[in-house]
Image: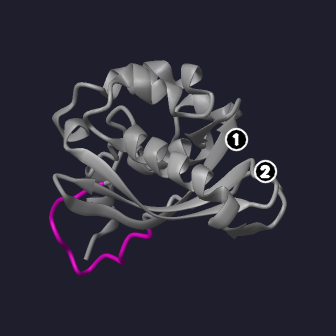
Amino acid sequence: MGTRHQARRILLVTASGIALAGLAACSSSSPPVSASPSVSTSPSAPASPAGGGSSAATSQITTNWEGFFSGSTSAAKKITLLQNGQAFSSVINGQAGSAMSKSTTAKVLSVTVNSTGTQASVKYTILIGGTPALSNQTGAAIDEDGTWKVGDATFCALLALENNGKAPSVCSSAG
């Protein structure tokens, strides 16, 4: 029963405490929010379900994705878990100390690695204090130099959701 107004208040607390779009007053007069920062990445080969030969990739994606969104992960570590993370260091460091960021976690629901093994679609839920704040979202994981990372385009979509559709300028060069 979230409203657009509610979605703006949850402050998407991703990596460093970034964003979870708003939980506040309920209002049934507003249309429900589609707080789905689904992210398209650059064109790639068709995706295929992860499994079998890609179980190591699925495991690393899950570990790194949940680590990036965990409130207990240091800002320095979060920067290493984000595609082009150094470019986002001021955003991540700026949000690292917030109380909401410290109570945020993510649960990876599924991973689908593309046939080239360089990108993956990740279905996930972000929780604040154990309560789902953004459920069944779709984002991208990118293999950057042999490490699976949260795609910067996914992060930027969450930042834009937090800030009434405006992402920070660093996002203009994101994925």
Q: Horizontal placement of 80 versus 107: left or right?
A: right
Magenta span of residues: 22-34
Judging depth in this view, the residue of 121 and 171 nearest the camera is 121
Please name the colour scheme applied to the rendered image: one colour
Q: What amino acid is labelled 2 in the image?
A: Ser
- Where is residue 81 shown, x and y percent of the image? 51, 33
Outermost residue, bottom side? 28
Work out whether mark 1 precedes mark 2 in sequence or the reverse, and give the earlier one: 2
Mark 1 Cα within 10 Å, few/some/many (few <14, many 20+)?
A: some
Going 42% across and 25% down the picture, which residue do you hit? Answer: 77
Report the residue at 68% width, 57% height from top. 40
The count of marks equals 2
As for residue 59 lying within the magenta part, the answer is no
Q: Which residue is mark 2?
A: 42
Residue denoted by label 1: 175
Residue at 30% of width from left, 69% of height from top? Answer: 3
Q: Position of residue 43 (x, y in %)?
A: 83, 56
Secondary element at image label 2: loop
Residue type at tag 1: Gly
Q: Nearer the viewer, residue 29 or 13?
A: 13
Q: Are marks 1 and 2 in contact (CB under 8 Å)?
A: yes
Report whether residue 139 is seen. yes
**Foreground of the two, 122 or 168:** 122
Where is the N terminus found, in terms of image quarters?
bottom left
Q: Position of residue 48 (x, y in %)?
A: 72, 69
Q: Is residue 105 above or below residue 3?
A: above
Give the CA distance from mark 1 to mark 2: 7 Å
Q: Is residue 14 visible?
A: no
